[in-house]
Amino acid sequence: MLSEWAAAHERGVVVAGPMWDGDRWVDAVAEFCRAAGWPLLAEPCSQLRRTMPGVVVTDHHDLLLRTAWADAEPPDAVLRIGGAPTCKPLRLWIERHRPAFALVDPAGTWTDASFSVSLHLPVGPDAVADAARTLVSPESGWAQRWADADARACRAIDGVLDAEPLGEAGVARQLGRSLPGGHALYVSNSMPVRDVDTFLRARAEPLAVHANRGASGIDGVISAASGVAASGIPTTVLIGDLALRHDLGGLVGAFDTAPATHGGPDGLDLTVVVVDNGGGAIFSFLPAYGVIDPVAFDRLLTTPPGRSSAELAGGLSAAMGFEHHRVGSCEGLHGLLAAPGSHRGVRVITIDIDADANRDQHRRIAAATEAALGAGETRSP
């Protein structure tokens, strides 16, 4: 059924949402994308945002799908694997164009809040690979247009980030560049999971990416990341200052974990990267920002600014003896994250973020991407 459905649609995309077992889908999805000539829109928590020979993996579809280019390149079909994607522009793009939509759903969860699914397939990776072997890739240039658009978006993003002080987008990009292969990245809700989805790029070295989406809360993030580290995998958690405060007990517990249980004199290998924007800065991205009284907005939706996480983490580190670093550049962050085997134990890295500058940077990146996608021929023949 999947092979006939895919053969009937030339301009399709494969969407990969969150999957804890995404590694077992890699070969099948890659084979399908190559055979169908479809690009792969994979969020990092799918475990499929990685370089694959012959596959167009779009790193920046969150930004691409906000542009006029994306509406000039509507899909005929969407094949989704995994849970509901984090990317809101992706959902809205699919809702606008209403392509044929097949959901590969071996667990029968049927997560489809937009009621877009037209074909439900309770099958596993073997069925996807079998379907791929019956397909003949068209010569339409569809996937190459996505590759070209993503490359232009990448240059536009780098043009902004490389010229400006380190912000939340730059931190997310740097984690993908710096973390060694075989590490795990645990991502908090709120802005961290969105920034990682938007700015972390495909790479050849394996990097397991985890997040607790669910009700999208910020409780227990460090505790959950400690559970990943307890499996013996070096783990980095990206978290905001408000979520840090919500789970200080998890930080204490991670430090206090019995070393004998976790294979080394310093217990868990856990790095906590804290972007301190004063708490609640995600709400400044809402339409209400700039419309209602700014004093009332800040009083109701943000926490008092103060760049306090560095002092908080520094005080705990002094009391308990774990590492604390305060950085303000990509180079400084890279130096702490990149060297494999240079660290074991618990450490906290804090990065001060100006919330207003951060919001404006996100908007400049979106504008630069729109401008880059408008340059040159983007409309299909």
Image (cartoon, grey):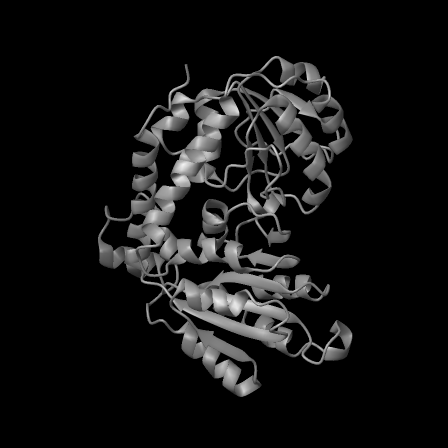
Q: Residue at x 65, y 79 (%)?
A: 256
User: Where does the N terminus fall, quadrant-wise?
Assistant: top right
- Locate residue 304 relative to residue 210 in the image: left or right: left
User: Where does the C terminus fall, quadrant-wise?
Assistant: top left
Residue 189 drawn at (x, y percent): 51, 54
Q: How many marks?
A: 0
Q: Is residue 246 visible?
A: no
Residue 63 drawn at (x, y percent): 41, 39
Q: Is residue 120 visible?
A: yes
> Is the residue 221 above or below the residue 374 in the image?
below
Q: Nearer the viewer, residue 98 or 113?
A: 98
> Is the residue 70 above or below the residue 287 in the image?
above
Residue 117 drawn at (x, y percent): 59, 24
Q: Residue furthest bottom?
A: 319
Q: Residue at x 45, y 28 (%)?
A: 93
- Locate residue 58 relative to residue 278 in the image: left or right: right
Residue 361 drawn at (x, y percent): 31, 51
Q: Nearer the viewer, residue 286 or 327?
A: 327
Q: Residue at x 52, y 42 (%)?
A: 86
- Locate residue 139 relative to residue 182 in the image: left or right: left
